[in-house]
Image (cartoon, rainbow, N blue to C red):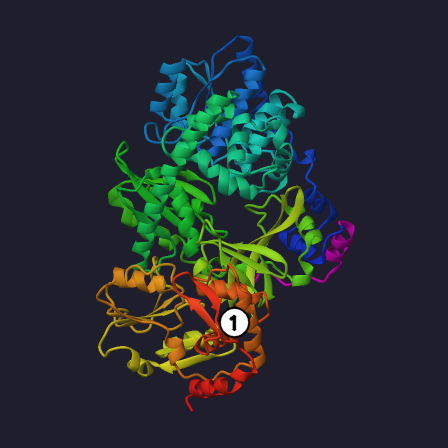
Amino acid sequence: MKYEKAYLETLNDSVKYMQNKFKLPYKIANYIYHLGYTNETDIDNYLYPNEKLFHDPFLFPDMEKIVNRINYAIANNEKICIFGDYDVDGIGATYILCKFFEEKGLKVDYFLPSRYQDGYGLTISSIDKVKDLYNPNLIITVDCGITCVEEVEYLKKLGIDIIITDHHEPAECLPDCLKIDCKIKNQNYPFHYLCGAGMALKLVYALSNFESCKKYMTVCAISTISDIVELVDENRYIVKEGLKNFKEYCPQGLQYLFKQNKIIGIPTAKDISFKIAPKINATGRMGDASISLKLYLSNNVAEIKDLYNKVISMNDTRQNLCNIIYESIINILSNSKEDKNIIILKDKNWECGVLGIVCSKVVEKFHKPVILFGYDERLNMYVGSGRSVGNIDLLSAVNNCANVLENFGGHKYACGVSILEEKFESFCALMDNELKDLENKEIIIPKYEIFIEENELDLNFIKKLDLLEPFGVANPEPVFAMQTNSLVCSPMKKHMQHLLIEFKGFNALFFNHSKDIYTLSYNANKEIYFNANLEFYMRKPLIKINIKDYFCNDYKQFNQDIAKGAYILQDNYQKAFKFNCSRLEDYRENNKKTIFISYFNADINYKFDVVNYLYISSNVCNKALLISPLSFNNLENFNEIVFIEPVFSTSLLGYLNIKYPNMKIYANLFKQEKFDYKVKYDIISNVYNILISIKDEIFDEIYLFKKFINKFGIKFEDFIVAFNILIDLECIAYDRDSFKIYKTDKVYNEKMLNKLKVFERVMKGD
């Protein structure tokens, strides 16, 4: 898919001043300008956030009363219980207060509700459970409670005081108790996007001092990143400061978790989002968040290892459930003809605890808001999780459908919803209507922010880009675009679904795109879209590139030919040999169902998950083209296989004969077809000299030839022709069982010239 540029480069005095003042590359200065930082103070705070951004906690209206109430509880040795939540944010917030009170010499109890036994947040049943377990005088909530009006009244009847610290959107009616929430309207606190752990940190600040807060800022940073809140202003300072002091203040159990995930040194926001947060969250999703909290709290090495193993086991279970649900959703949507503004699905067999993660994957694939529902037998209703995309305020849309819901909550980018089965269809219709006026173009079409030339991407540029970290909501990681044509691609050895890509001295990763190996290897102009950041290996700074997507305009003709019913015989980078279906009659029986296999990829939309089909006609079972297959499964409906490019592995043919004993297989068609392509004799000579110098290389796939020959500056189409010529002249031999090339007793030299000319005439059809 072709990306659009997010904005034009701005040649004005502000950008030039910023570039010189902060010693930034022009394109980074321009990017910051378009983020909205247009004056010197804002830019300085953005690039170098400092403690001035850590706002006074007493700007919260009830903070002074809350401090007095807690100090009274401490002075009178009252029993305090911290009531948290079961995600990374709630766990981190609970840890901060428990650890703070412990260091003050006060042992407090904590309670994290079970997603399946207690449900979300402060409920009447969970209050009863806390009373029976701890009989507290005071409950302090973290990351929950701001909508619990009835529950607070129930606590009053029990004679239990409550202080609410939360960051979620409040309802119109607030609970009648002491409370702090950065989202309460008409208060003086200037920042509205703290997470639950951030609110707990503000309470610690009010109870002690700024220096005390530094001890807990690392845990708060992890929660801030994990809870997908805006990484600007105060949050930006918390995360920068917390990660900077990671080694000093990160709990021992968490350090072990980071180490086991091969995160050495100061972690990035991306490390936490993709490698750490899902594992910590897994325990809450699977029903017992206390396992992760104990990992935070423990200083015992043996206990930490045991807790870590439990976390990983729960995460493995969570991953399996996510994969099963995700695959079922893809099947549903692939067979659906509806085109709604939002994807809303339900299934009684879906595990409610993992639906938020699956939502995010579905959003990434379809670029639409998503809400998925599983059935909660305890509540006798559907319980769902939602994720937004772009600037869509999902919670606001859900709020406008409140009349058909039993419960809902969350924030702009993520929400939780519960609904009775009989109201589900009404909810779907209402939500689709709520989102009908959105500018879908802004959601669906991806953007890149910075177009960069190959010579501009160096360590100095990336070091300056590193000042923009941490990336996240409201501070997106810039997507770069670059024009290139020379890419050397190979699958990762242990993870064959991912690609390693070399270009212009850079090493890049392209996750889950091994199927594109041949397309990317084409010597054709391509535009690649990627993220770039700084990493260290053996204390040496390196540029790390993750490719997100690519576009190649040269493949438009390919798609048009396929649409007209033409096949590609061989794409030789510069042009394609095309022929109509009738030209294949010599190689396949009439009225047979045929699958044609090509290793040369194209910019097309695939229709199946396991293997990559491209429709040639409306009836895929009659004739279809299989592009760069990762496997040869699910071909039972076909009568014959036709390989369009040469097959170098007889083992592959043997495997197919065993797997499909009744299927006819045609291979090595390339050498039998007439084609109009000349290769110079000196190139053949060079290829010959290269091939006879080979000793231990094994070539069991075409891309290995491509990667090898690329080092010598020879076009792959030249190599293919020369390779086949040299085999036919018996100058080299290729062992199709061991995948090795051998020198024969015949030598390629000028004496071969006459024989070669005869061979060339045969190839041309003369």
Q: Is residue 683 above or below residue 467?
A: below
State which quadrant residue 291 falls in: top left
Is residue 69 shown left or right of residue 387?
A: right
Q: Secondary structure at mark 1?
A: helix
Pick the front one: 413 or 329: 329
Residue at x 43%, y 44% (from the top left corner): 395
Residue 409: x %, y % from top left: 41, 38
Q: Residue furthest bottom?
A: 766
Neighbourhood count class around disc 1 (C-alpha, 10 Å): few under 14, some 14–19, many 20 upward = many
* Residue tagged 1: 716
Residue pictured at 51% horizontal, 87% vertical: 754
Determine which quarter of the picture holds residue 354.
Answer: top left
Assign the C terminus to one quadrant of the image: bottom left
The image shows residue 578 at horizontal and vertical percentages of 41, 80
- Label 1 is placed on what type of residue? Phe
Quick check: is 455 in the magenta stretch?
no
Instruction: Name the one closer to the observer, 655 or 750.
Output: 750
Which residue is painted at 55% across and 26% down in the image?
252
In the displayed structure image, the side of residue 656 where residue 248 appears, left or right: right
The relative height of residue 518 versus residue 133 in the rendered view (above or below) is: below
| Depth order, front residue of 8/643 | 643
Q: Number of callouts in the render?
A: 1
The residue positioned farthest toward the top in the image shown: 76
Q: Is residue 484 visible?
A: yes
Residue at x-position 23% and y-position 65%: 637
Where residue 718 sits in the image (x, y, percent)?
Answer: 52, 76
Can residue 397 be seen here? no
In front of the other: 754 or 351? 754
Range covered by the magenta-colored residues: 1-22
Could you say where residue 126 lies in the image, as x and y percent from the top left?
Answer: 36, 23
Residue 403 occupies quadrant = top left
